[in-house]
Structures are given as C-alpha cells and as structure tokens.
Amino acid sequence: MLEVAGSWPAAKTTGGIGLPRFAHLLPGGEDLVSLGEGDTPLLRSRRIGPRLGIDLWFKNETVNPTWSYKDRYVAVSIGVARSLGYDRIAVSSTGNLGVSVAAYAAAAGMRCIVIIPDQAPRAVFQQAGLYGADVLITDWEARLTLFEHLALERGWFPIGLFLPRRVSNPFGIEGYKTIAYELIEQLGQTPAAVLFPSARGNGLFGTWKGFLEAKQSGRTQSTPRLVACQPAGADSLRVSLQQDAPSPVELPQIASIAFSTMEGLADGRALDALRASQGTALAASDPEILDAVAALGGEGLFVEPSSALPVACLTALIETGLVERSRPIVCVLTSAGSRWAEQVPPIGPEPTRLDASVASLDRWLAQRETTHG
C-alpha cells in the first residue's frame, strides 16, 4: 500500500534554494546537508518533441552538484545520519550514488566507504576518492555482503536503496518527492506523464509520493501517469505488468550500455506506483538507447545512457495511446554523461584534422557549404 506522509502547506518554501526550501517536509530536515541540489531546470524540447508531435519537457537533473538526481536522496540520508549521531557512512553503488555519498559525507565531515563493482568506470573511483572516501572495488555479487557487514556488525550508517532487505534506507526516497513539487511549480500544472529511468525504481516511487502529497494538500487536482523505462532484458517492471504479477519478477543478470539500470529485480513499491498511477513500463535496446543519447545531444544535453532511457521509450509510449499529445510529458534525465563517457562508443562525427593554414580552413568550409547547402 502506498503511504502519504506529511502535507504540503500553503507556503511553498521556507527560504533558501533547492532542497532546503522543503526541509520541513523531509526527515532530518533540520540536519539536511545541502550542496545546492534541487531546483533543477525544466526545459522544453526544441527538436525531439516537435518531431514526435508531443509537448515534451526535460527535467534536467544533470546539473545537481555531483551531476545526478541521487544528490536529492543523499542530502536527506546524510541529514538523517547526522541527526542520529553517526559519523561514518557506507554505501554500495554502481556509480552515481557512490560519488554522491562521498561528496556529501565530505561536506558533513564524515568518514565514508564506497563499495563499487569492478565494471564501473574509472571516473567513479577517481571522483569518490577525490572527496576523501575509501573506495573498495569488488565483485558485482559481493557488494551486498560487504555493505551489510559494515552496517550490521561494524556500526556504519548504510546509505543503500529502499528495498526489502536486512539493510534498507527508507529516508532517501523522501528527497525524490521534491522532483514532483518542482514539476508542479515549474509547469503550473501536473504533467500528463513522467518517464523515469528505473533499475530498482526508488526514484520513480519517491517522485510518486511527492505527487500524492501535492494532491492531498490541494496543490494539484491530479497525478500523472508514471512510466518506468528500463533496458531490454533488465525490464523487471515491464515483465511484471505484462504477467500481472503481484510482486516484481526477477530476471537473469544481463550486460547493457545502460549500466546504472541493469538490475534484474525491481522493488514492489515501484510496481505499486505504476499501477496506482495507471502508468506503464517500457524497455529499450542498446541501439535505441544510444540513438536517444545522440538525440539529446542535439538538444544540447549530455546524459549517461541510462538517463536517455525515457527518450528511447517515447515512441513506444505514444503508440500505447495512454497520454494526450497536447499535454506536457516529462522525461527525467537523471544523470550527466561525463563520468560515463568511456563506456559509450563514439556517437558524433569524427573530428577533422586541418593543416596549420587559413587555406586549409577555407577549403574545408567550401566543402561543408557544398555538402550542406
């Protein structure tokens, strides 16, 4: 069952920018650790939306302090840890969450251990280490065992996901509620649909909670359809809806260009949110994901492959007939492509080498004008 916690009072802010505006609605709000996360831009599509004939918007989470929407989750989690008297933080991550925890732990003056699988890009190790974290690289399957040992036996505060496990973090998803609050403010209405890249589905579920609270408090009269977007083969939510399963179906582990979202099992709360919102779940292949990365580049946006999943699933969503083309559709772009660049094959045109002469440049310009008119 989905819960609605707290309410959204008439005063929309309590001062400041980003998450601190909503600190009174978040656990550990007085101890919230902020690096300026939140209040991210909502951009209307200039190319993809018009081409598809829809009113398309991008919620650009890549401009958060560590380039990821995880900063909302971590700001709240670190605040709760501090309010409970912890000074040591542990996290298991495929990349973005680990970097975010390392940064916020540094800001809070806390020790930090980041456990990362050896398939993660080197930039993740480097950035987490830059913030002063101890980075431990291990096997994909070993991460959980080490993480739980630190939490249960050694007294480290665990910033993991909100999942039905021995060690779970129920606090961080409250930070994702602010995505819903901001969307309603920025659009002046509730969007028809919100597409979210989904692995376990914590971000999708947390955002759904935000829309429920906004409706309960009278800030909006409606809620959007939620659309979970997953890599083909790691599409637990899509398969679960297709099979009308009471709980998420677990799939075999796969490899995908969408590294951050290639989990084989989603969380039941995300599945409940999809059903409650009358939404759906869709999947995209690696080529479709890379095409979406390139298409977003044409919008001036550089995202990691997992974050391009909503755009990769847009055509399939339109074909379902679930949303009106004239109403706002929002793709949440969860993280930037910078630290994932080495994982992605070349997408754009190859650079051109010129001789060190003006004549060489003029010849190139003439050739381009002939080609492009």
Image (cartoon, rainbow, N blue to C red):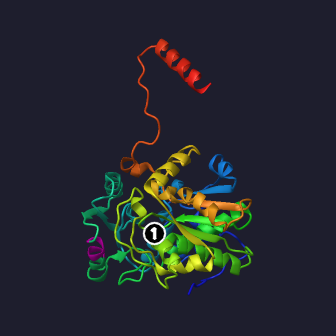
Magenta segment: does it hold 292? no
Q: How many marks?
A: 1
What residue lies at 48% left-to-right and 74% top-to-bottom? 239
**Magenta-drawn stretch, dominant element (helix, strand or loop):** helix
Quadrant holding the N terminus: bottom right
Measuring from the top left, give residue 205's x and y in whole percent: 54, 75
Quadrant holding the C terminus: top right
Residue 110 to residue 83: above or below = above
Residue underneath mark 1: 235
Residue 116 to residue 144: above or below = above
Q: Which residue ends up furthest to the bottom in the rendered image?
A: 1
Measuring from the top left, give residue 155's x and y in whole percent: 30, 80
In the rendered image, is residue 15 in sight? no
Q: Is residue 137 left or right of residue 174?
A: left
Q: Which residues are magenta?
A: 142-147
Residue 211 to residue 138: above or below = below
Q: Is residue 277 left or right of residue 352?
A: right
Residue 198 to residue 270: above or below = above
State the residue in front, 14 or 332.
332
Magenta segment: does it hold 143? yes
In the rendered image, is residue 357 in sight? yes
Quick one: label 1, few (<14), some, or many (20+) residues within 10 Å?
A: many
Q: Which residue ends up furthest to the top in the rendered image?
A: 359
Measuring from the top left, give residue 187's x and y in whole percent: 71, 61
Q: Secondary structure at mark 1?
A: loop
Can you tell which quarter of the image residue 216 is in?
A: bottom right
Measuring from the top left, give residue 141's x and y in whole percent: 28, 71
Q: Amino acid at mark 1?
A: Asp
